[in-house]
Image (cartoon, rainbow, N blue to C red):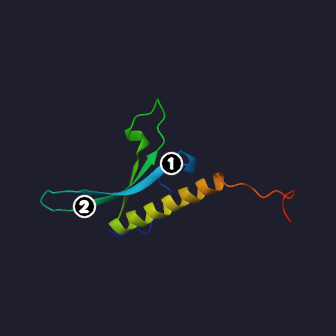
């Protein structure tokens, strides 16, 4: 099943994200198929339910789920690196 649609299905700021992972859910019924998801682990808020803080987005293939997970985790690491970086000040520049 290949879908050419590229649309935002979930919008989460990187400050709310802990990490993401690819999840495979296998159906051991008669067809033996699998479904592929990207699971986003969000920081928990006291009034939130646990399930709402780990949303899953379905993907067409395992390779797509892994690629999306890799991109999300990379974006999160760049965000955290920038957040903890010091800005160069003109007073201290040579």
Where is mark 1, residue-wise?
17
Comparing 24 with 92, the one in front is 92
> Closer to us: mark 1 or mark 2?
1
Relative image position of residue 17 (x, y in whole percent): 50, 48
Relative image position of residue 38 (x, y in whole percent): 39, 56
Camera sees residue 66? yes
Q: Residues within 10 Å of mark 2 (few under 14, many from 20)?
A: few
The answer to whether 59 is drawn above or below residue 55 in the figure is below
Q: Residue furthest left?
A: 30
Relative image position of residue 23 (x, y in whole percent): 33, 56
Q: For this view, does 53 lie left or right of residue 90?
A: left
Q: CA distance from mark 1 to mark 2?
A: 26 Å
At mark 2, the secondary structure is strand
The answer to whether 84 is drawn above or below residue 50 in the figure is below
Q: Residues within 10 Å of mark 1 (few under 14, many from 20)?
A: some
Q: What residue is at 43 percent from the left and 47 percent from the top?
A: 41
Q: Quadrant of the N terminus?
A: bottom left
Where is mark 2, residue-wise?
34
Camera sees residue 7? no
């Amino acid at each position: 099943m290949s879908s050419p649609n590229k649309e935002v299905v979930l919008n989460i700021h990187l400050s709310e994200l802990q990490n993401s992972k690819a999840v495979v859910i296998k159906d051991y019924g008669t067809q033996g198929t699998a479904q592929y998801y990207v699971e986003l682990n969000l920081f928990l808020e006291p009034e939130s339910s646990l399930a709402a803080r780990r949303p899953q987005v379905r993907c067409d293939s395992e390779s797509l789920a892994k690629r999306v997970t890799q991109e999300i985790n990379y974006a999160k690491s760049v965000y955290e690196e920038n957040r903890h970086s010091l800005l160069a000040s003109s007073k201290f520049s040579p």
